[in-house]
């Protein structure tokens, strides 16, 4: 096999981003939490539509997670922190694949805003990476905190009979809270309330727009 040059690496990265943002990402490493559950053919059409929109929001959130971790790893000066980001991104890849599987079951397209939010998230992650490991890891913790909150909200909003989506979101919630604690345990900064408020506003922008688009 020939060695990859910079152009090859760039094209590979572009291909990866296109797959992530268009709903064609690689398969998950872990089994889908919904695999063992019965189908949901009995869901009313309006419930299927609502569940699909909620899972589209979750899918976009995982697109953002991939971008954030990639941006943070690309600018981190600490090798251990960069590896932590890459490992977390691999676990988040499972979430992305599970959400894609569920969207296909619910016949719901991915958000057309995915490329925009990917670009914004990558930029934010790259900036955080330049600020040192403490801020970089703190950004992970603060971001995962936002994700966990909107997953809790979705668990309350899901149609009662949608056990397949619920199983996926519950596992995602467990993983996200674990990532948050790991980032803090490794020395991540606890962000002050004003910064968290700004992050909450950005999170709401993403969740409210991708529910519809």
Image (spheres, helix red, strand yellow):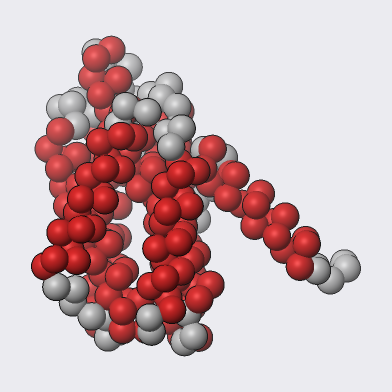
Q: Quick check: 98 left or right of 180?
A: right
Can residue 98 be seen in this snapshot? no
Quarter holding the C terminus is top left
Toward which corner of the image does residue 138 lie, by quadrant? bottom left
Task: Give the residue furthest to the top.
Answer: 45
Toward which corner of the image does residue 51 lie, by quadrant? top left
Q: Residue at x 15, y 27 (%)?
A: 160
Q: Name the residue nearer the viewer: 40 or 127.
A: 127
Quarter holding the N terminus is bottom right
Q: Quick check: 118 left or right of 43?
A: right
**Could you say where residue 209 lies in the image, as x and y percent from the top left?**
30, 34
How many marks overall? Answer: 0
Task: Give the residue furthest to the right.
Answer: 2
Can residue 114 be seen in this snapshot? yes
**Could you say where residue 193 lies in the image, as x and y percent from the top left?**
11, 67
**Could you say where residue 3 lies in the image, as x and y percent from the top left?**
84, 71
**Could you say where residue 95 lies in the image, as x and y percent from the top left?**
39, 50
Q: Is residue 210 placed above or below 63 in the rendered structure?
A: above
Q: Name the residue nearer the viewer: 107 or 205.
A: 205
Q: Residue at x 19, y 32 (%)?
A: 158
Q: Name the residue nearer the viewer: 108 or 160.
A: 108
Q: Residue at x 70, y 60 (%)?
A: 10
């Amino acid at each position: 096999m020939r060695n990859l040059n910079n152009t090859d690496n760039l094209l590979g990265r572009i291909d990866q981003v296109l797959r992530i943002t268009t709903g064609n990402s690689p398969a998950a490493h872990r089994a889908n939490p919904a695999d063992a559950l019965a189908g949901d053919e009995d869901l009313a059409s309006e419930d299927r539509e609502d569940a699909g929109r909620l899972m589209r929001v979750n899918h976009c959130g995982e697109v953002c997670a991939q971008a954030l971790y990639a941006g943070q790893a690309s600018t981190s000066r600490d090798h251990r922190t960069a590896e932590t980001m890459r490992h977390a991104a691999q676990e988040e890849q499972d979430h992305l694949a599970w959400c894609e599987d569920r969207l296909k079951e619910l016949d719901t397209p991915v958000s057309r805003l995915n490329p925009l939010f990917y670009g914004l998230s990558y930029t934010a992650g790259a900036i955080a990476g330049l600020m040192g490991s403490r801020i970089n890891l703190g950004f992970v913790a603060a971001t995962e905190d936002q994700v966990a909150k909107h997953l809790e909200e979705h668990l309350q909003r899901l149609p009662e009979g949608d056990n397949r989506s619920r199983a996926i979101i519950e596992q995602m919630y467990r993983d996200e809270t674990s990532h948050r604690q790991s980032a803090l345990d490794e020395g991540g900064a606890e962000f002050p309330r004003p910064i968290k408020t700004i992050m909450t506003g950005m999170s709401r922008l993403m969740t409210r727009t991708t529910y519809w688009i």
